[in-house]
Structure formats: C-alpha cells, structure tokens
C-alpha cells in the first residue's frame, strides 16, 4: 500500500484566477456517482491495485510515468492511476483495464492536462478521467476513429465529480473553450450525459448540439496561427 499511496491521492486543484461562471453545486456522496455509467469493476481503484501488483514491471512503469508528469508540472492534476484507464469497453474487447502508454508519446498528454488544470477544473470542479490511452487494437474494437487522439495519449475523457447538469456542463465548458481553447490548442467534445473529452490535437469542438447553452461552442473564435503556442510547453511537445 505504501507504493500505491502517492498515486492514489487526489491533488487539489491548482490556484487560478476566479472565472465568471457559476460554481457547481457541492457534492452529495450519497446521491452522486458520475462514474457509474462508465467505470466497471476491474477498472475501479481496487482493480487498479490488482493490476499494479499483477506484473513486476507495472510499478516501475507507473513510477516513471508519474515522474514525467511531475517534471512537466502536471503531476497531481488528477490521480496518476486514473490516467492509465484504457477504454470503457475494455472487457468486451478482452483488453487490459489499465495500460502504461508508450514513453515516446507521454509528451502528448502534457498540454491536455494543462488545460484541464488551468481552465476546466476552475470552472467545473474536480474531474475524474475514465478513458485515456487506447492501443491500436483496442481503439478499433472500441469504435474509435482510425487516428483517434486516444491512440497517441493526446486525449482524456472525464466526468465532473461535483453535481451538475449536462446543460450547465456544456455551457461552462463551451465558454471557457471559446475563450482560451485556441491559445492552448485543445479540442473539446461531449458524449452522452456528463462524459466529455479534452485533447491537444487541435482547436475544435463537437457534440455540444444546437441548444442555447452551446452557443459559445458555435461562436468560438478562430484558432491562433500555428506558430503561436502557449507558454511553458515542453520543448519536445509535438502532437502526432
């Protein structure tokens, strides 16, 4: 358990300037379980412990991945173990519930996590990743796009941990994405209910629909020129 403790702690959201969005309602643990539709037994925290201890190379790989995130300032944005979740359809596909992404692709997740840290969490509160890396075979089985950002560890699907509605989630995330998504070079997507997607592939959005709360997504500003990238980006950051 000592080995697991550093990776199971949920870091508090980093300090950020107040945003002009209504704060989410405070959680009621007895009634609110946003991960239930997406996280099955085996991909939960006990499942992670079992996976972690199942092979001698898993602890070393997790430690190296965590160290990389810390080096680039995004350690603790969310618990590292949750970033190892594969696909929600892992059981149907006969895949592992957790997988350490190839080290050559670790740079791709840094900018995604920066946007989550700097813009998403201040608006919607803490979040929980439910799907991150999908190897090529799992990506096909799970119905992902051929060149899905999940294949390259650019994307994180997550849910808000504080109670909210789909309408409020879309309204707040569309607004913040319209304001700063082009600056960070990130995409925003919505799936049924409260699942949403952030990736560092390009500035775009989808899945918000035509409802009034999605107005900001429909009127998002044009992306910045490719030469203009956010500060602090790692020198080796090069989305594929």
Image: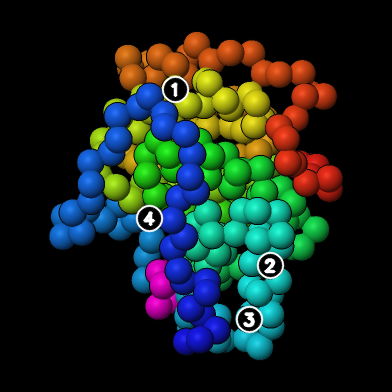
Q: Which residue is mark 2?
A: 67
Q: How is the image coloured?
A: rainbow
Helix, strand or loop at mark 1: helix
What separation in Å lies between label 2 and label 4 (alpha carbons)?
28 Å
What separation in Å lies between label 1 and label 4 (alpha carbons)?
26 Å
Mark earlier in primary sequence (3, 2): 3
What separation in Å lies between label 3 and label 1 (alpha carbons)?
39 Å
Is residue 146 or residue 201 the one in the foreground? 201
**Residue 217: x, y in percent?**
47, 19
Query: In which quadrant of the rendered view does residue 171 lie?
Result: top left
Q: Which residue is mark 4?
A: 38
Mark earlier in primary sequence (3, 4): 4
**Residue 107: x, y in percent?**
74, 51
Q: Which residue is mark 3?
A: 59
Mark earlier in primary sequence (3, 1): 3
**Residue 113: x, y in percent?**
59, 47
Residues rendered magenta in the picture: 42-47
Helix, strand or loop at mark 4: loop
Helix, strand or loop at mark 3: helix
Q: Which residue is mark 1?
A: 175
**Residue 209: x, y in percent?**
40, 21
């Amino acid at each position: 358990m000592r080995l697991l403790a550093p990776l199971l702690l949920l870091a508090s959201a980093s300090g950020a300037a107040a945003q002009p969005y209504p704060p989410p309602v405070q959680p009621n643990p007895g009634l609110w379980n946003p991960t239930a539709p997406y996280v099955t037994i085996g991909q939960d925290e006990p499942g992670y412990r079992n996976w972690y201890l199942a092979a001698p190379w898993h602890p070393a790989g997790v430690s190296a991945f965590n160290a990389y995130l810390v080096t680039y300032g995004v350690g603790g944005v969310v618990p590292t173990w949750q970033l190892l979740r594969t696909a929600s359809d892992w059981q149907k596909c006969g895949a592992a519930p957790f997988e350490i992404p190839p080290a050559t692709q670790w740079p791709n997740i840094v900018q995604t996590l920066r946007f989550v840290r700097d813009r998403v969490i201040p608006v919607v509160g803490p979040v929980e990743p439910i799907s991150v890396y999908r190897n090529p075979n799992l990506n096909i089985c799970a119905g992902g796009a051929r060149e899905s950002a999940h294949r390259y560890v650019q994307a994180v699907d997550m849910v808000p941990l504080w109670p909210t509605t789909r309408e409020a989630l879309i309204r707040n995330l569309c607004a913040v994405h319209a304001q700063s998504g082009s600056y960070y070079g990130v995409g925003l997507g919505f799936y049924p209910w409260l699942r949403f997607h952030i990736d560092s592939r390009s500035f775009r959005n989808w899945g918000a629909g035509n409802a009034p709360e999605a107005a900001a997504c429909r009127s998002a500003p044009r992306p910045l020129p490719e030469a203009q990238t956010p500060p602090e980006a790692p020198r080796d950051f090069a989305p594929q």
